[in-house]
Image (spheres, rainbow, N blue to C red):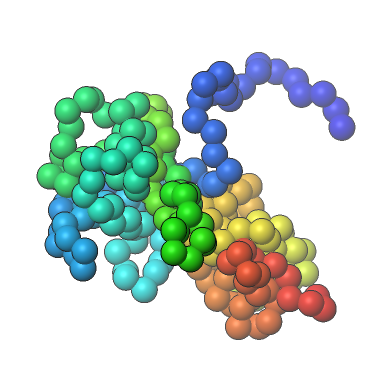
Amino acid sequence: MSAPTGEKPNLNITVGMPLTDESPFLGTVVIDTVEEGTYGYQWHLAVKPCEFELHGKAGTGAFHTYYGVSQAKKSKIGAALEALEGVVKKGTRVGQDELLGLTCWWVRKDLPFGTDKETGEPMVAKQVLIPLRKATEEEQERAAKGPVSAEVEAPTALDEDQLEAVLAVLRGKSPKDAQIAGAKSKLPPELKQFIMDGTAYDHLIENDVIVLDDDGKIVDKEPF
């Protein structure tokens, strides 16, 4: 492998920066409200990805998290509020539409909250929306343009090379994280769209090419 040439890129990697094993994405807040749920009032946050289209049963094009209203630090809302301190000004109210239009980097991550005293099972809040950092001016401009491949038509069939390229992106990821990875990949626009709109996952599941393992991650169905 040849050594890189030219100007060194700014990777924005610093000591003390937030680290995550999940797939971060650039997203805009589209819902920031308080609603009454089964166990009392909850903060409803919805974030719409800026660089890929999200297709789900809800049809909102956004990721959603419902946070129980609490002042406890070790809680879903506590984790989100603590992370928001680095993104918005102190005193910003949540659940009052004050976050609407906020564009920043987000991650959906599982948050452990100890062990259930009765069952001994670990307590985990799944796929909670957590902000990571502010978006730069360039990222804000990019977000305003929307998904670059929104008008690209996804393929209806794949040759062997295309299939392997798509599988390389999907393997080891949840279906939702696979869509994010597709958006960030260097695949041709039509293959990116194939992954980003969920078609790739549905098509490969239906044709017994992939399955989900016990952790909800995409793996090849044996034999491949």
- Work out which residue is located at the far right of the displayed protein and give it: 1
User: Which residue sits at x=61%, y=22%?
Assistant: 9
Name the residue nearer the viewer: 149 or 90: 90
Q: On screen, 50 above or below 192?
A: above
Instruction: Answer with left or right where residue 112 lies relative to residue 73.
Output: right
The quarter of the picture where the C terminus appears is bottom right
Res 81 → quadrant: top left
Instruction: Examine the rendered structure and indicate whether residue 173 appears above or below residue 85.
Output: below
Where does the image place residue 14, in percent across and percent down from the top left? 55, 19
**For residue 89, above or below residue 26:** above
Q: In which image quadrant can residue 36 be found?
A: bottom left
Q: Residue at x 60, y 83 (%)?
A: 206
Q: Position of residue 17 (x, y in %)?
A: 51, 25
Q: Total marks drawn?
A: 0
Furthest residue to the front? 118
In this picture, residue 54 sits left or right of residue 200: left
Q: Residue at x 51, y 61 (%)?
A: 120
Q: Quadrant of the N terminus?
A: top right
Front one among 87 and 205: 87
- Residue 113 visible within the image: yes
Q: Nearer the viewer, residue 84 or 153?
A: 84
Left or right of 224 on screen, residue 144: left
Q: Residue furthest top?
A: 7
Asked whether the viewer can see residue 143, the reply is no
Residue 161 image point, x, y percent: 77, 64
Measured from the top left, where is residue 60 in percent x and y?
29, 64
**Residue at the image point whose x is 16% and y is 52% from the top:** 33
Residue 201 left/right relative to 66: right
